[in-house]
Amino acid sequence: MTQTFQILILLLAVISAVALVAKRLKVPPAILLVITGVGLALIPGLPTLQLAPDLVLALVLPPIIYWDAVKMSWKEFRFNLRPIALLAIGCVVFTTVAVAAATHWLLGFPWAVGFVLGAIVSPPDAVAPLAIARRLQLPKRLVVILEGEGLANDATALVLYRFAVTAVMAGSFSFVEAAGSFAAILVGEVVWGIGVGWLMLRLRRWVRDPGIEIMLSILTPFVAYWPPEQLGGSGVLATVAAGLYVSWNGVRLIPAATRLPGIVFWDFLTYLIEGMVFLITGLQARRLIPVIRHHSVAELTFAAVVVCLVVIVARFVWMFPGTYLPRWLVPAIRRYDPSPPWQWPFMLAFTGVRGIVSLAAALAIPFTVADGSPFPERDLILILTFCVLFVTLVGEGLTLPAVTRALGLANAGRRERQAEQDEEYKGRRRVIEAAIERLEALVEARKLPEAVVGPMRAHLRNRLEDVERHNDGNERYKKLARLSDELELSLIEAEREFINQLYRDGELRDEGRRRIERDLDLRDALLANLRPGE
């Protein structure tokens, strides 16, 4: 037990160190964590850590995709549903078939085994490319499509994976039956996920206790994921549906006292989970060393090159027809959604980075089939999966900034960000104006005294002036606004020092100190929130 805790603390220390280095180098932590894990795996004497596939698929995957869905805009997801579906379903199926065909004809895999490998390596992971995309300020729509694809593609891949593994185990496969099951899974999981989201939000509204509400939010992805997964589905679509439902309806049903700490908690939890899994993914290289000895270097190299090329090229082959053909064939789509420049589909095609789901699925392959014989090519599938993960994550991930700049897409979304900020400040102004109107109506209706209304009216007008200063096109006013913020932060810091001095001198009790500090924290957060793009 002591050794387990020591290893856990060591992993946390490594994740922290890598995060600092990644921030300095402006590289997604996921890439450096995998490289670090591979490096640590090659050091003799270090304990071997095994990534339990059931742990990833049942415990790690649900909270990650749930929180990504909660952060996703339902309106943007719905608007981009067609390109998201073409990638999350169409491209995953196309890549699975392409890998199965290539491994069957070039590597001699049985068709069913080829489909197992294809389903494993077909779904891209969105963590690393999204981190780069946001930093490089890509057009917002590209980021939304990548987010949406990352939410849904695992469901398609895991369902195909289970069909393929069943075919290998049983020795037979029915396409018609599989298609019917896939449609039933799709509809059933979406309905179940919406139901879970509805129920959990009502429970949280009824409880009205931040601690219990956050606990219910932790349970939500698992309640959505586990029943469909146990019944033969993937559980992913149900979890995504629950998250999107909470995203759309939570603003009305989740109180601020829960929402503020909940966001901090979930951001930390998902960051920690992703960091742990990517690091342990790299450490799995040690498990591959004994397996590699059973194959020649030439055989492994040829197989890895074939599979990696097919995985990368298949996404490009799918992307351009999937982008332009619907617009050419259906005029209504062309009018509603004009064709983007060629750089957009190229960029989306280049972000086909594989991640933790692929490795977990490979590790979850049974060791034997129904008759007790070994699962065909299981070890080779595991090696090829790791090669695809490493090549796409490290190779494409590290070159993604250079490709983005070469395509002329770096900072292409800057105007969109400015437009979003203008829209945000306009919304802030209208919200405050609505509050002023409500205040004046209450004054008129209830004949409120000026002693009560005056400070409120002055506070609202000060807020309105502050918003207008931050969004004024005049650079002089913006500088004055920034100076005002700096002075406010300095005053907040002075208040912090003073209340701590009162606490140390025994003139203020701990509970009072914490309440005052919370007020100061909220004021500090308000200043930071008012300038999101700076």
Image (spheres, grey):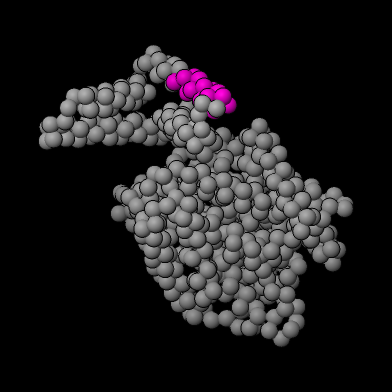
Q: Quadrant of residue 465?
A: top left
Screen quadrant of the N terminus: bottom right
Magenta-drawn segment? 488-505
Q: Is residue 345 above or below residue 440?
A: below
Foreground pick, 125 / 330: 125
Counting from the top left corner in percent of width and height, residue 20 is at 67, 36
Residue 426 lies in what quarter of the image? top left
Q: Can you tell which quarter of the image residue 2 is in?
A: bottom right
Q: Position of residue 121 (x, y in %)?
A: 63, 61
Residue 14 seen from this side: yes
Residue at the front extreme of this rendering? 506
Residue depicted at x 66% and y 39%: 19
Position above or below: 326 against 460: below
Q: Residue at x 58, y 26 (%)?
A: 504
What count of labels does the image hold? 0
**Residue lying at the far right of the rendered structure:** 44
Q: Residue at x 49, y 37 (%)?
A: 511
The reply to whether residue 350 is in sight is: no
The answer to whether residue 459 is magenta is: no
Q: Which residue is pictured at 43% across the width and 74% down the height?
A: 184
The residue nearer to you, when weighing 308 against 515, is 515
